[in-house]
Image: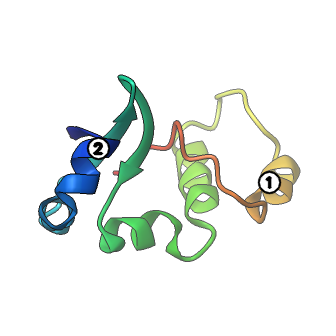
């Protein structure tokens, strides 16, 4: 993942958009700390486009790891439709 400052993005937005269109994400930093991630629309739609991407990803993970402790199905369903999505720890792949 490429890393860029906000000022770099401000001055090089067309190049950065081209970079994410080619499939490379950009981690955006402010004062050396990550604050956002720039991803292609295709990757965004895959992860969150349906509004249930995180929910479905978590359910898939639970099927693969049935013995893992975590949220109940009811807790997951209650969180599913809340916005904004907290994607800070979401694996986009």
| CA distance for labels 1 and 2 | 35 Å
Residue 19's image quarter? Answer: bottom left
Relative side of 84 to 36, left or right: right
Residue 7's disc is: 2
* 29 over 81 or under it: above or below: above
Q: Secondary structure at mark 2?
A: helix
**Res 92 seen here:** no
Q: How is the image coloured?
A: rainbow
Position of residue 35 measured from the top left corner of the image (x, y, whole percent): 47, 37
Q: Secondary structure at mark 1?
A: helix
Q: Residues within 10 Å of mark 2 (few under 14, many from 20)?
A: few
Residue 17's image quarter? Answer: bottom left
Which residue is located at x 20 percent, y 54 percent? 11
Which residue is located at x 73 percent, y 32 percent? 70
Q: Residues within 10 Å of mark 1 (few under 14, many from 20)?
A: few
Q: Residue furthest top?
A: 32
**Res 74 seen here:** yes
Position of residue 9 measured from the top left corner of the image (x, y, whole percent): 26, 51
Between disc 1 and disc 2, whose residue precedes? 2
Per the image, the residue denoted by label 1 is 79
Residue 38's image quarter? Answer: bottom left
* 39 over 90 or under it: above or below: below
Q: How many marks?
A: 2
Residue 59's disc is: none
Position of residue 41 measured from the top left corner of the image (x, y, whole percent): 34, 73
Position of residue 80 measured from the top left corner of the image (x, y, whole percent): 75, 60
Relative side of 2 to 87, left or right: left
Between residue 92 and residue 21, name the one nearer to us: 21
Relative side of 24 to 51, left or right: left
Which residue is located at x 80 percent, y 51 percent? 73
């Amino acid at each position: 993942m490429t890393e860029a400052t906000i000022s770099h993005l401000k001055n090089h937005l067309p190049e950065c958009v081209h970079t994410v269109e080619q499939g490379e994400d950009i981690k955006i930093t402010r004062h050396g700390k990550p604050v956002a991630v720039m991803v292609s629309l295709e990757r965004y739609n895959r992860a969150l486009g349906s509004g249930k991407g995180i929910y479905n990803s978590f359910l898939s993970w639970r099927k693969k790891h049935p013995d893992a402790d975590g949220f109940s199905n009811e807790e997951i369903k209650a969180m599913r439709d809340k916005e904004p999505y907290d994607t800070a720890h979401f694996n986009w792949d």
